Image: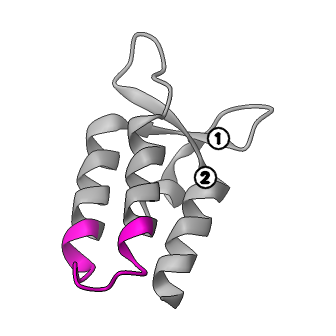
Amino acid sequence: DLLHKARFIPFSDQVRVGAGKLAAAVTRVRAAVPADRAQTMPLVEQLEAHTLQAPRIPFTSEVRVDREAVYDVLDRLRAA
């Protein structure tokens, strides 16, 4: 829902998301996924990598996130 409501960055597949909100969402995903499931932890780590490597938008607390890439990881998590 966070990415669905995010504002698009013109001429790209990226959206603007608050860095704190995104980090909190990834933390909730990590807490919801059982740690003993070996196939899901690499996907959670990919999601965290998208968060940590997201470029900051100057003069804001927002970052740029590739919406489709994050949705792809979330879809694979749901299927696992």
| Horizontal and vertical percent position of residue 77 | 47, 78
Front-most of residues 40 and 8? 40
Three-letter residue code for mark 1: Gln
Q: Which residue is mark 2?
A: 67
In the foreground, 1 or 54: 54
Give me the disc on residue 52.
none
Disc 1/disc 2 C-alpha distance (Å): 6 Å
Q: Main secondary structure of the magenta part?
A: loop
Relative to 41, is 78 above or below?
below
Residue drawn at (41%, 43%) of the image: 51
| Residue drawn at 55 percent across, 58 percent down | 70
Question: Badge 1: how crowded within 10 Å, few (<14), some, or many (20+)?
Answer: some
Q: Residue furthest right?
A: 11
Mark 2 falls on what kind of element?
A: helix
Where are the magenta residues, as a range? 30-42
Residue at which label 1 appears: 14
Labels 1 and 2: the sequence-earlier one: 1
Q: Amino acid at mark 2?
A: Arg
Task: Establish if 59 lies above or below 32.
Answer: above
> Residue furthest toward the top?
59
Spot occupied by residue 56 in the image (x, y as percentages of width and height): 45, 23
Q: Could you tell me which quadrant the N terminus lies in?
A: bottom left
Asked if the residue at tag 2 contacts the one at tag 1, i.e. Cβ–Cβ closer than 8 Å, the answer is: yes
Which colour assignment does the render follow?
A: one colour
The relative height of residue 58 versus residue 23 in the rendered view (above or below) is above
Q: Residues within 10 Å of mark 2 (few under 14, many from 20)?
A: some
The quadrant holding residue 45 is: bottom left
Q: Residue at x 23, y 52 (%)?
A: 24
Callout 1 secondary element = strand
Q: Position of residue 28 (x, y in %)?
A: 23, 66
Q: Is residue 39 magenta?
A: yes
- Specify the farthest residue to the bottom: 79
